[in-house]
Image (cartoon, coloured by chain):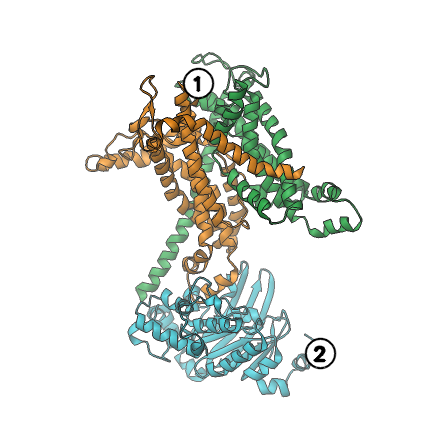
Amino acid sequence: MAIGAAAYTLLMLALITYAVGNGSEKIFSIEGLKFFTSTDWNSVEGRESFGALPYIIGTLISSAVALAIGVPISLGIAIFLSEMSSSTILSKISTPLSFVIELLAAVPSIIYGLWALFIFRFWVLNLIEMPLYNTFGKSIPFFAATPFGLDWFTAGIVLAIMIIPIVSSICREVMRAVPDSQREAAYSLGATRWETVRIAIFPYAKSGILGAAMMGLGRAIGETMLVTLIIGNAIGAAAIPSSLFSPSQTLSSLIANEFNEASSDLHLSALIGLGAVLLMLTMAILIGARLLVSRMVKVSPGFRE
Amino acid sequence: MLRRSSRRKLVDKVVSVFAIFSVILSVVLLGSILIEVVINGARALSINFLTQTPGAIGSGLGGIGPAIQGTLIVVGLASAIGAPVGVLAGIYLSEFAGNGIFPSSVRFFNDVLVGLPSIVIGIVAYVTLVITLGSFSVWAGAFALSIIMIPIVVRVTEETLKIVPNSMREAGQSLGIPKRKIILHIVLKSAKSGVITGIVLAISRIAGETAPLIMTILGTDLYFTSLTGPVDALPLRIWRLASQPYQYAHDFGWGAALILILLVLGLSLGLRLLAHKRGFKIGSIAAR
Amino acid sequence: MGLDEESFTSGEKLKDEEIKVDKAIDRQTQSKQDQQKQQQVHKVSIKNLEAWFGTKQALKNINLDVKEKTVTAFIGPSGCGKTTLIKCLNRMHEMTPGAKAKGQVIIDGIDIYDRNIDAVIIKRRIGMVFQKPNPFPTMSIYDNVAAGLKLNGIRDKQLMDYIVKESLEGAALWDEVKNELGKPGMGLSGGQQQRLCIARALAMQPEVLLMDEPTSALDPIASSKIEDLVHDLKKRFTVIIVTHNMQQAARVSDDTAFMYLGELIEHNPTKKIFENPEKELTERYISGKFG
């Protein structure tokens, strides 16, 4: 009986692939590979045409921002927790800090979205976007659009916050796994703390850290609800950003926004097609991450969407 | 020479400052989230808010009663499906399986399943249950949530069981107790807290999921009618409220968010406090 | 502080520019010059050293002098504080959470516990080899030896090649690895790895070489190679070695310090310790009556 339950995993994977494949069959049979390169998104009857390209781009750039910001900060936290907790003052902080990180991981993403939409967006708008716009808006086209705070950049920043718990905890685990004898060797040569991290810890933990980043990437790519509220909801070619402050759209946010209002079978199939693309992307990343991070590192079950 | 050494020290200082900054940043952000939810949410709370159905859009009346009820129903049903399957699979992996092709691929793909986007899971549930049954339903929603829940439970169960020392199993064997009973009465008993912790954490996770509910339970303004009909849920309601242009809707959204956070954090925190009291140390496995 | 590339030659000590420039240290050095004339023979002078782990005192009022270019062994039963003592000599003791040390450790005229001395930088002048060989696994043999040099900003490849060769020769490893410098450090046998770690420490041209039970993880043949090496090393370095193996202490050292329960019981030439110890406790330990 237990074997049956275990077989569930493989069965479920098969089911997922089948369901997504079946649902998207229609759009792929009509558009074929053009689905990946077209920027159309036209649901008007008689002129229907759907392409996933803008949303693939939106997904990738917002996740890129998320990684660019989230990984260094996660590393900073991991360095703090695994290397800087030796003085008694700082070590008292590390338990409450781990607790804080766990809490961050437990907050449902819709609540991140709520907070991002009503609160954080204005922080980004006033502290980062407006200053950039005022200083560079006239000279550099990339900063030329009027910022509202509802764009792929803000989405990327909030995604960064979301992935910090998982990336930092995996990084911390792999860094902790480096034997103390390595640290002693580096310190005995007179290395500073950062140099010790650089020559004794990072090389040892390299693949684990990379795996952590990939986990974070997988998470950011799959995130839906928060993105729908903060990315500005652009459609079609307009979703391809022309500036830092352009509204955009990701694969998952468009599915969430349009699924219940899909106007035709083809439209629905196109949305499921987006899901297929998302599925392929995510599986590739997760399989890569899984291969990099050994099972000895216990992965958080608490991350979501 | 002087420059070189002071440069090394400077770099070290910069990195240390950055590390501390990262820590402070994450604390500040979490603090902001919690504070905003509590402050804004508390304002919307009232008995009416918790028990009434939503009023007409734009009216400023009503409450989120159906959403609370719906969350409890769907999450409860999903857990009733997901927990047993997950625990059984975890037992299999830990007690019966070795490292052959089948168990290894189950473990590998289980880890992959944990990370799949939940909106894709929602699509799967839509295609399999909503289309075939012809309507949005509680079943579809519970099915989708259980798909998300099971891999987590499998993982936690396997790892918790693995920690139980082999000497216990051997003691049972030497007494002639059949394997099935050894697992149920000896191994599982000793790992009980860890497994339950894992289940509860998985539950608190799916309670906060929104995306898979969009295309499965649809959401409604009415209280629960039947398992084959649509139902509302807190995360879904929050999303809809936040998307409306009315201030009162936003306030309601905060209120619903407060309820949701109390539910989710209450589950995971309450559990850890209980576990600490019992002296059971939650390792990194289930605790995050 | 760093290696002065232009002035580096074989056998010459590192010029510690930074410490010289630091005025506070200058004053201290100058005022000690007279004392130094008397202490000229003493490379290391430990004065009133005490150490704790939290509230537990691990070293009580240690006073000990070590002569230049000699080998001194610290012996004693488990828990006597010999490892704690050697770790105080390069300020690694206090890196353990809750650990503290107080007193003076004067190496070549400079008190490493002086307030103005940077605990991180001072380690560059004192070499340490650990019980279990710990080469950096992701680095080649060459890179392992050069690790400390790179940290100090040495970029001249010729200079680095020269120092690496010299250090590996000094560690009696050069002949065995000279054609495989690019191979990973972990590929060597246990005894070779330990000699690699010695070479890594030697590359920094330390004032003093500290060895914490360097052969306890090695087989007898590898151990005896290391012991022969120590004989050679003392021509150029002052060596302090912790060992739980009394016979090793007898074979390898010029002077021996016997410790018990955090106190220095007796410190005398090795011959005297083993043949005619002053203290009864020493005699009992030597003859195996305890420990």
**Residue C254: x and y, percent?**
53, 84
Compared across the picture, whether C159 is left or right of C204 comes to left
User: Is there CB contact under 8 Å for labels 1 and 2?
Assistant: no
Judging by colour alone, the chain drawn in cyan in this rendered image is C
- The residue positioned 36% from the left and 34% from the top of the image is A56
Which residue is identified by label 2?
A: C289
Instruction: Classify C228 as above or below B163.
Output: below
Which image quadrant: the N terminus of chain A? top right
Instruction: For mark 1, name the chain.
Output: B
**Between residues B169 and C111, which one lies in front from this camera angle?**
B169
Chain identifier for the orange-coloured part of the image: A
Q: Position of residue C280 (x, y in %)?
A: 68, 82
Q: Chain letter of disc 2?
A: C
Q: Amino acid at mark 2?
A: Lys
State the residue in front, B149 or C103: B149
Q: Secondary structure at mark 2?
A: loop
Q: Which label belongs to residue B248? A: 1
Residue B121 % position (x, y): 50, 31
Report the front residue among C234 and C30.
Answer: C234
User: Do we see residue C23 in this rendering?
Assistant: yes
Which residue is at 41% across, 53% downward? B16
Question: From the viewer's perspective, is residue A249 above or below residue A99?
Answer: above
Q: Amino acid at mark 1?
A: Tyr
Task: Determine the CA span between mark 1 and mark 2.
Answer: 86 Å
Chain B takes which shade in the image?
A: green
